Image: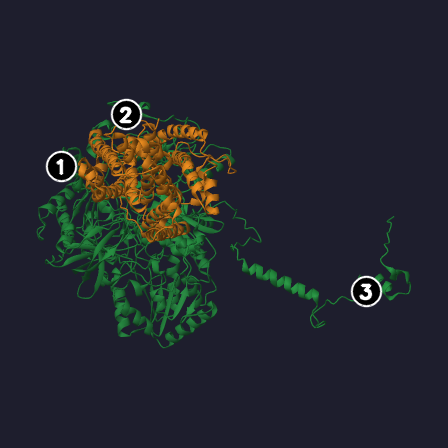
Amino acid sequence: MEKKNIYWKGFEELNKESEIVKSLEQNEFVEKLPVGNEGENKNHNRRDFLKYAGFSTAAAAVVGCEGPVIKSVPYVVQPEQIIPGIANYYATTIADGYDFSSILVKTKAGRPIFIKGNKDAKSMNCTNARINASVLSMYDVFRLQGPKLSGENISWKNFNSSVKADLSRLLSENKKVVLLTQSFASPTTEKIINNFIQKYSNIQHVVYDAVSNSSALDAFENSYGKRALADYDFSLSNTIISIDADFMNDWQGGNYSSGWSKNRVPNEDNNFTMSYHLQFESNMTLSGANADNRVMARPHQLKQVLQSIYFSLRNQKYNGPSLGSYLDRYVKLAVESIKKSGNKAVVISGLDDVDSQEIVLMINELINSDAFNIKSPKLIFQGSDKDILNTIKELKSGKISGLITAGINPSYTLPNSDEFSQLLNKLEFSLCFSMKEDETAQNSKYIAATPHYLESWGDYEFKSGNYYLSQPTIKPLFDTNQFQDVLLDLIDSQNSFYDEIKNNWRTNILKGKTWGKSLQDGYYYSYDNISLNRIKSNLTFSNSPSSNDDTLDLILYTKTGLGDGQQSSNPWLQEFPDPITRVTWDNYLTISYEDAERLDLKNYNVSNGALNGSYVNLSNENHSLKVPVIIQPGQTPGTVGLSLGYGKTQAMSEEMNVGVNAYRFYDDFKRVHKVKLTKAEGDHEFACIQLHNTMMGRDEIIKETSLKEFVEEDKSVWNPTVMVSKNHIETMVTSKEVDIWREFDRSTGHHFNLSIDLNKCNGCGACVIACHAENNVPVVGKEEVRKSRDMHWIRIDRYYSSQDTIRGDVKAKDETSGYREYRSTQTNLEKASANPQVVFQPVSCMHCNHAPCETVCPVAATSHGREGQNQMAYNRCVGTRYCANNCPYKVRRFNWFQYSENDEFDYNMNNPLGKMAINPDVNVRSRGVMEKCSLCIQMTQKVKLDAKKEGRRVRDGEFKTACSESCDDNAMVFGDINDKESEILRVKDGDRTYRVLESIGTKPNVIYQVKIRNSKKI
Amino acid sequence: MSSHYEAPIRKPLVLGDKSYGDISNDIARPVETPPNIDWWIAFSIAMAAFLWGLGCMAYTLGTGIGTWGLNKTVGWAWDITNFVWWVGIGHAGTLISAVLLLFRQKWRMGINRSAEAMTIFSVIQAGLFPIIHMGRPWLAYWMFPIPNQFGSLWVNFNSPLLWDVFAISTYLTVSLVFWWTGLLPDFAMIRDRAVKPFQKKIYSLISFGWSGRAKDWQRFEEVSLVLAGLATPLVLSVHTIVSFDFATSVIPGWHTTIFPPYFVAGAIFSGFAMVQTLLIIMRKVSRLESYITLQHIEMMNIVIMITGSIVGCAYITELFIAWYSGVEYEQYAFLNRATGPYWWAYFLMMSCNVVSPQIMWIKKIRTNIIWSFVISIVVNVGMWFERFVIIVTSLHRDYLPSSWTMFSPTFIDIGIFIGTIGFFFVLFLLYARSFPVVAQAEIKTILKSSGENYKKIRDK
């Protein structure tokens, strides 16, 4: 029983009749407390006052101390697929009208953060710098967040009904509307467009490629009756004759370098042979830089070279103008090589006229080239110059009343874009499908906000019978709708684009493979080759007139970084150094020494080393531009090069607005134009990350040999062990005698090595961007790059020879004697040759076993890992920079400023959207801290943990770094040398292995393979 | 022992008709009289420069090292150049007071006080740079082996930068103690003369209760000798260790075994030049011509000439070894030094440090005050460029030509350097008005043997 204690409360209790006692039996208080709803009690009392005062003080305090607001939304229901910390991969496809590839997208917590090639796909699976960087373009703050009508935001429902009303009216008035789109190469999109045109019969579909492939397409169509491009597999050829085709870059859609690299390493399997690559060209291109022999010729000569090769192969006499002895010799060499190789030879060309392209097709047919493939031609480009020129003519004449654009930006990419914009502005109806409010969108009435390709569905047929799928890897970030979905809505279809793709694939494409599996794989191959027969057998041999003295040939090209310019607001790509010039944040006119001297144009270094260049006025009868010049070794005298894709101004931040718009000169979509140059006032400030272009004859940086020497001579001739002198006795650098360190036992556990094959690396820079994405490398902007403060963890050094060959440089240096000669030789070696040999060398942290950086750090912030890595403890670093000074390879990068969340560096790491691309596995470094390559320790750790969880050993090939993973050419091999079965061990023990600057005794864990040149002397 | 007979052919070290009282009056005068307008002008300029430098340092601290002209290839430039320059200057003081004491060079007595003051003030300037050149200077205490709660973190005893920390802090401590010990009788003298109670209080505090008893003097002599013995190896060790920053690295132009003696000689060279600069002004301004005589200036000029020649020898040895080694990187590093884009810095270094002191062979010039002053400035400029040449020209073109670049200072770099010069002069000017600038107690011990008037009396 509970005993109830009664406590005496006061005298009032003695009075049994008391009201107070009675009321207290029922209530807690005697009187009703003055609390209640407003209105009941108007008199605010002390309690209210305290309440309000307390609340407002608290509110003021909360507002006053604005803490960092971190917007993170927890899942209400945990999605099944998303496990925090575990990445998901989706196979999808990029086809933005310029880049085409099957890719794998890594997503972390639902955010796509990294792109790599889909290696399961058998073709079109390569990634380049632009594709790797495209993930960041999705997180662009300048993206459209919803549809717009005349500049006002509008809902999709109203947008569609308004467009529908306009289109119906135009249809009833029978006014012509043009649907101007990129090349989609998409079977389902094509179907939807056809249905759309069926409904709106006044609409004409025109395909427009910003960078035209029309002549090659026309040539193929003329020859075989199908609008396509021939495909080439360079792994099947041992003689590659390229006439101005930059096939390692973007030529005809790219994806060719991996085939090229397969035939570049002589070994037991291929009987110690490698392909021979001869390049005739005007600009210095990536392909030319990697060629075994590179021949400079002007565009009209290139055409003659091609014709001359054709006639020689047919054993006929070439009747064109004389080529001169220099070119004749190389034509002879080309013909001999082709004849020797037979069907293992291939001839390709980037010449921009139908005749030449027809000749190329004919030559490859003639020699029955294995590499040449018309059974499964490429369908990625469909644009026709004639059609687009016609459309513009009709626009001008007022025949067209409406224009729908999708995936293109003609107000930027057309040569007469200003005129086009005015016409577009005046049109009765204009609808632009765009991700951004770009030049075209700004002049259109309707702007349909489209999602990024990583948020989209899609299907593609890149090559006949080779189908690819793309799927969203993230829920659309904004209120966007795909072009195809809008079209479906406009034709009152109940289906979404996804339904259409699925139906189309199930009924028309898939045979024996399920939809689900195809979606998971990202591709489907039908292996139904088409058979094309030659329908035209006569060739025309036209000649371009040679220039008179004061005009130059302007050759427009696309840069590895920006391509056609659609990603020009991508900070990674802007800061990406061009593989050839190594200039970032700019385009420029490349000019030969000879012409630069004639016009008094200069490149010079200012006091902090930064590069400046003269300006020129570039003009022809239609246009003129003020352009800075870069004096380019290997540029053919009489020609100048200028890259497209720069000078875009709209829908991007001020910082990205760099370079000049070379599309201004892209009249008639021809790459080559006659121009005049005059020197202009002032100097341009470049942000070039390599200020010294030659190797100064140093032979410990890049080792080279010739194929002949490699095959015939012993390793000790072409890759001798480095000797150092100890007590005047020549001792091998690998000997314990010359080692001042006590060696750890490295035989247990993993020991990572990265091998870089200089024969396979073509300098494309895909690894640079992959590293950017994986390791949260900051973008520092043009001004900082100009101050030599680029932050790239991996860079691709490019060296020109100063003599005719790189080995010539070494010889010139070795053969000097005496101070005078030494000094003059060294001075001469600083200048690159007019047509130099070029080498590329990717350089990241070498992870030296005897690292000079480790001993000098006063706080031991950088130390050696158990697995061979040289590690950086960012938290411990106080920033003395001693380690960077003492690094012989100069790979350490210092955070001179706070690069993230700093308005002075307003790039991707300064806005919440851009920060979504940050890899959560790698921390973002603060200012004052040294950083550098970690050999992607977060990736190797994950592999180890996965294996441990599964209770197995790590399999060979599992260990990867971002750079090795992104290398389509397999130039980089990464792995554990303690695994006796591993490929890296096999590579490391090979004869070609050497280490950079081995004589210093740093014993790097990044090793290189001697470059072998198959150059032929004539 | 200090008042022994001195040969009459020896020049007197104290000029004029000085009595013990005159010496006290002369030395105490700057402390006891208010400063003149010249002092105020000099002090204002120094203070302005100091504040300007302080502003630049604050800006660096707030924004980042990116405000300097450094880059990925040249990670040190003006910061460490200034550091080594100031440390070098700091060498003369201890050399004069310790080494010359051990060698019984009595001429040191006129200059040792100010030389030591200069040492301490310049080591303070030097000590600033290792701290502010850090990316995260607020963590500078991590450079000390302090037991901590960060786990088992400890400093890296392999790092020359850590050796620097010990070398410089030891040097500063020993120099300070040595200096102060010498100051005790002189402070006591000022204390005894002081009439204002506040002044008296302060000087009695800092004279540590000096009473002038025989026991005090005996201990004073012993401590001085012991400290001199301790400080002498430091003269050699500090700059040896500073040179290890470079010598132990792998960078061509840095990785050189000649560096320790070469740096020590250079340090004495620049230190004496700075003492010369300061004392030529001070003897005039504070009317100390009787104590800091032309003979002193000549002696210092001889030291400058000899150390300058040693340094010149080292420069040429470097060039010879670069050629003789047959190492291509080494050869290029020196070719680039002499003929590369920074040839002008090398030329300045060579002409200021090697050529200019050689004119001291001419007696007329080394006993000429204007010439001595000019040369002392030239030598200091040259020695600054020596460090700049070593640091920047070695770094800017090392092994891989792809990373080669240049360095150009920003106004922050320049501002901080000017700021330390300002700071140095602020300290020195304050010292000149509050400390006995000549070791008067020691001077008094030689007055009867080396004083001009006593010599005259004796010789008659």
Cα separation, mark 1 vs mark 2, equals 32 Å
Contact between labelled residues 2 and 1, with CB atoms less than 8 Å apart: no
- Of the chain colours in the picture, the one used for chain A is green
Badge 1 or badge 2: first in the primary sequence:
2
Q: Quadrant of the C terminus of chain A?
A: top left
Kind of residue indicated by mark 2? Met
Residue type highlighted by circle 1: Arg
* Residue A761 placement: quadrant: top left
Side (left or right) of A922 relative to A893: right
Residue shown at 87%/49% (left/top)? A3
The image position of residue A216, as x and y in percent, is: 24, 55
Q: Which residue is mark 3?
A: A30
| Element at label 2 | strand
**For residue A896, above or below residue A650:** above
Q: Which residue is mark 2?
A: A732
Q: CA distance from mark 3 to mark 2?
A: 103 Å
Q: Which chain is orange?
A: B
User: Dot 3 falls on which chain?
Assistant: A
Residue A259, percent across and down?
29, 43
Q: Which mark is residue A820?
A: 1
CA gap, disc 3 to disc 1?
Answer: 113 Å
Question: Disc 3 residue type?
Answer: Val
Q: Is there a contact, CB below 8 Å, between mark 3 and mark 1?
A: no
Whichever of callouts 3 and 2 sits on the residue coming sooner in the sequence is: 3
Judge the density around disc 3: few (<14), some (14-19), many (≥20) Cα neighbours within 10 Å.
some
Q: Disc 1 vs disc 2: which is toward the camera?
A: 1
Query: Is residue A380 in view from this perspective?
Result: yes
